[in-house]
Image (cartoon, grey):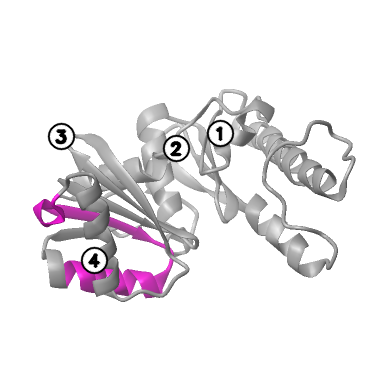
Amino acid sequence: MILVMDVGNTNITLGLYEDGHLRHSWRLSSRVARTEDEIWVFMNMLGRGANIDMSKIHGIALGSVVPSVTVSLLRLISKHLQVKVVEVSSDIELGISIKNVDPHTVGADRICNAVAGFEQYGGPLVIVDFGTATTFDIVSDNGDYLGGIISPGLESTAKSLHHLAAKLPMVDLKFPESLIGRSTESSMQSGLMFGGAEMVEGMLRRLRGEMGENMRVIATGGLAPILLPELPSVESVESTLTLKGLYNIYLKNE
């Protein structure tokens, strides 16, 4: 069994691969400071719920954009598992090349998305990831990672509006019944959701001007399925894309 660990600014997503298939996945908050022993307890509780013995793991792929959590996880692995760890960076075999970009500034999650996306769809390809930030990652037809775009995420924007404006509530991220809001809540939802979709479509239109009309587009991240009906340029949603990338990278460096 191979454990893949995607550490983002909001969540730690764990995935367990067996015989090439993702058998189970779980999510923990990465905003809560936990020791390696506390994380290990949570992992074992999750494993028991799925009838999985975590001590049977024989390899780990780790991709992290939160250095403090990385340290805790590496200590956990050293203390409790003592197995081979492939830590995602531009310095290992990826299956793609990072061109004209400072490779050490590209987040591990974005590398994983590019690796899995190119392996499955080829290029030229754009991966839109709806996370804490909304990111666009671009891969050429011959597997060169060309760079990307980072914009505020929908959840981050909603929280900012709520915190910065005294009378604006925290709203659910869903499409309202109409574009014109009939309340403060529906007006905010319209701006966030329809505005977010238009931003993505506008960016993709501009990218097609640079990359060509044969550019393919896929999406990932928790809000991707909700936004998909308003994103005609997006071919499909790959909800486990980052985990797939982690697993593929592990195999390339095993």
Question: Which element carries disc 1, helix, strand or loop?
Answer: helix
In the image shown, does 246 or 229 lie closer to the viewer? 229
Which of labels 2 and 4 is toward the front? 4
Across and down, in percent, residue 69 comes to 37, 70
* Mark 4: few/some/many CA within 10 Å (<14, 14-19, 20+): some
In this rendering, would 246 be left or right of 231?
left
Q: Which mark is residue 170?
A: none
Q: Which residues are magenta?
A: 53-78
Counting residues from the N terminus, which is met first, the one under dot 2 or under dot 4? 4
Q: Give the residue pinned by disc 1.
A: 225
Residue at image location 41% in from the left, 29% down from the top: 122
Across and down, in percent, residue 106 comes to 46, 58
Q: Is residue 88 visible?
A: no
Q: Give the residue pinned by disc 4.
A: 40
Are the residues tagged 2 and 1 within 8 Å (C-beta)?
Answer: yes
The residues bearing labels 2 and 4 have C-alpha atoms spaced at a distance of 25 Å
Counting residues from the N terminus, which is met first, the one under dot 4 or under dot 1? 4
Give the quarter of the figure containing the N terminus.
top left
Counting residues from the N terminus, which is met first, the one under dot 1 or under dot 3? 3
Across and down, in percent, residue 162 comes to 75, 62
Are the residues tagged 3 and 2 within 8 Å (C-beta)?
Answer: no
Question: Which element carries disc 3, helix, strand or loop?
Answer: loop
Q: Which residue type carries mark 1?
A: Pro
Q: Give the residue pinned by disc 3.
A: 19
Question: Which element carries disc 2, helix, strand or loop?
Answer: loop
The residues bearing labels 4 and 3 have C-alpha atoms spaced at a distance of 24 Å
Q: Give the residue pinned by disc 2.
A: 239
